[in-house]
Image: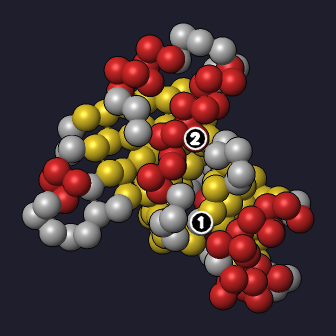
Amino acid sequence: MKTGRDMNNRREGSNQEKVQDLALMLAPFDDLRFAVLATSDDKGRPYASLIAFAFAPDHQTVIFGTPRATRKYRNIRDQRYVSILIDNRSQTPEDLRRAEAVTLVGTARPVTTGEYIKVFTDKHPQLAGFIDEPGTALIAVTIEQAVYVTRFQTVTTWVRQV
């Protein structure tokens, strides 16, 4: 993993380098299975949900499924901006030194792409039936910003360049 300084220095480079930086930032979280999704309703009230997730192969998108008859889905439909917290904490005192977390901020949208379905069900084969149900929506979040935190206070930020 590159340090915050290394990543910030590389951010001045090409678009390809920026994409690689995001993939490097997200690499420690590839094997994790669950995250916390934060949405807000039409009045701006926050709501957090546990999700099973997968990264698209290019690490530019996070994929998850949700029943359409949920507050989570309603919030995404009404307000597409979301954040996702992924962390590797173990609930021990050592987490202050060892835990890593990344907050991903982006835009969510329902998708039906076969590639996204495959990526999600390859990581979560036990959820294949859930994803296939007519009342389930597959959601893709395009990552616009990533904030990586390690050692409790070392922060590195990646921002999509338009």
- Taking the image as shown, residue 41 lies to the left or right of residue 115, namely left
Mark 2 residue type:
Ala
Relative height, residue 129 to residue 123 (above, below)? below
Percent position (x, y) of residue 56?
70, 53
Q: Residue at x 52, y 70 (%)?
A: 33
Mark 1 residue type:
Phe
Q: Secondary structure at mark 1?
A: loop
- Residue 60 makes an appearance in the image: yes
Give the camera-side residue of 109 and 129: 129
Percent position (x, y) of residue 119?
74, 65
Q: Residue at x 32, y 51 (%)?
A: 100
Percent position (x, y) of residue 21?
54, 31
Label drawn at residue 23? 2
Q: Secondary structure at mark 2?
A: helix
Label drawn at residue 53? 1
Label drawn at residue 34? none
Residue 54, by quadrant, is bottom right
